Image (spheres, rainbow, N blue to C red):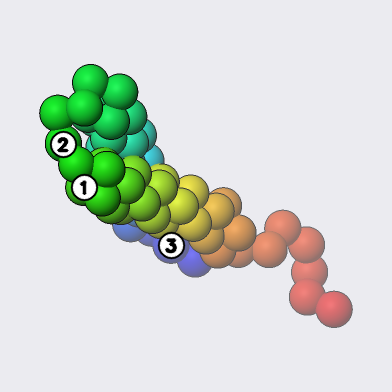
Amino acid sequence: MQDSAEIWRRKRRSNRAVLVGVVIVGFALLGSSLEVAPMLVTTILALVGMVLVMYGVHVGWLLFFDREPEGPSS
């Protein structure tokens, strides 16, 4: 079983990754709509942002499923 400090660190890392990913995707969309950056740059930024969001969701998902089972082992 994980201690509470480890759970807190993993949850914070998950939240940070999702938040940063959403911000990067937002900047990519804004840069694309205002045409301040080439399309390739905004596409790469959007992909990086989506990868960060997926990573954050994955870490959160593992945090939920890595806990100790509630019932007796079979």
Three-letter code, disc 1: Val
Mark 3 and mark 1: Cα distance apart in space: 40 Å
In the picture shown, does residue 28 fall above or below 41?
A: above
Which residue is tagged 1?
41
Q: Taking 60 as reference, is 48 left or right? A: left
Which mark is first along the chain, 1 or 3? 3
Q: Is residue 46 above or below residue 3?
A: above
Give the residue at the far bottom of this rendering: 74
Q: Closer to the camera, 13 or 71?
A: 13
Q: Three-letter amino acid code at disc 2?
A: Ala
Residue 69 visible in this rendered orientation of the protein:
yes
Q: Badge 1: few (under 14), some or many (20 or more) residues near its Cα, within 10 Å?
A: few
Residue at 49% from the left image edge and 66% from the top image edge: 1
Near-viewer residue (44 or 23): 44
Please identify the residue farthest to the left as the structure is shown. 36
Other-residue count near label 2 (Cα within 10 Å), few / some / many at <14 / 14–19 / ≥20: few
Residue at 43%, 62% in the rendered image: 2
As drawn, which residue projects farthest toward the top?
34
Q: Residue at x 28, y 30 (%)?
A: 32
Marks 1 and 2 in Cβ contact (< 8 Å): yes
Label 3: how many Cα within 10 Å (few below 14, some 14–19, many 20+): few
Q: Which residue is mark 2?
A: 37
C-alpha gap between disc 1 and disc 2: 6 Å
The amino acid beneath tag 3 is Gln
Q: Position of residue 13 (x, y in %)?
A: 30, 49
Front: mark 3 or 2: 2
Q: Which mark is residue 49?
A: none
Q: Which residue is mark 3?
A: 2
Residue 16 appears anywhere in the view: no
Secondary structure beneath disc 1? helix
Q: Position of residue 43 (x, y in %)?
A: 32, 47
